[in-house]
Image: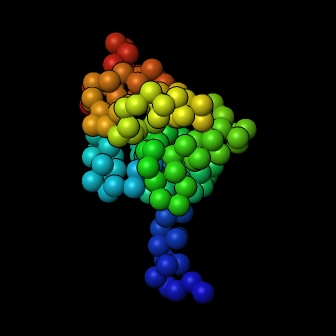
Amino acid sequence: MATASSSSRSQERGQADTALANSSRPLVLVVEDHEDTRSLLKYLLGKRGFDVAEAENGEEAIELAQRLHPGLILMDGSLPRLDGISATRRVRELATLRDVPIVFLSGHAEPSAQAAAFDAGCDEYLVKPFDLDRLGRVLAQHLSAGKPDGAINL
């Protein structure tokens, strides 16, 4: 049974999703369970002209990606409910999202962790704490951000 409060939150979320989906700015879906990292990425991306949608777990990421069709997904590896590898695989199985670039963010630098992420379908792999210049280059490579020099300074 939905309460008035949860119904109101759902309605607000739906209105925000519609605004994001109809925006002319590039949309990045940030999938991260740590609020501080998610907030930092949202701030940095928003400051550089990107719209940002946020998901806290892999299931929510898939749902939002299907609804919003982002230009790029930043996918954390360690997520509750559905980890980043599984969420990446499921996104890649969806025809409408197959070509959306996925940048995997992980605290694991081992070659086996990177191989697993690439096998699941990610396009890039960044190790946390990631270099902001490298993240800017990755965003520029995968999104047409309108920067003439091809760089996005974060």
Vertical position of residue 10 compared to residue 26: above or below: below
Relative vertical location of residue 1 with respect to residue 45 in this rendering, above or below: below
Image quadrant in which the C terminus is located: top left
- The residue located at (31%, 37%) in the rendering is 128
The quarter holding residue 98 reads top right
Horizontal side of 38 relative to 79 (left or right) equals left
Tell me which residue sits at (58%, 47%) in the image.
87
Name the residue at the right extreme: 95
Q: Position of residue 53 (x, y in %)?
A: 45, 50
The residue that appears at 70% across and 42% down in the rendered structure is 94
The quarter of the picture where the N terminus appears is: bottom right
Task: Write the residue at 59% across / 51% down.
Answer: 62
* Quadrant in the picture for residue 82: bottom right
Image x and y of residue 42, in percent: 33, 46
Position of residue 5 relative to residue 34, above or below, is below
Q: Is residue 49 visible?
A: no
Question: Which of 104/107 is in front?
Answer: 107
Q: Position of residue 152 (x, y in %)?
A: 32, 24
Q: Farthest top residue?
A: 149
Viewer can see residue 4? yes
Q: Looking at this view, is 31 or 27 the one in front?
A: 31
Residue 145, quarter of the rendered image: top left
User: Is residue 115 toward the left or the right of residue 49 in the image?
Assistant: right
**Above/below status of 74 relative to 36:** above
Q: Is residue 112 left or right of residue 133?
A: right
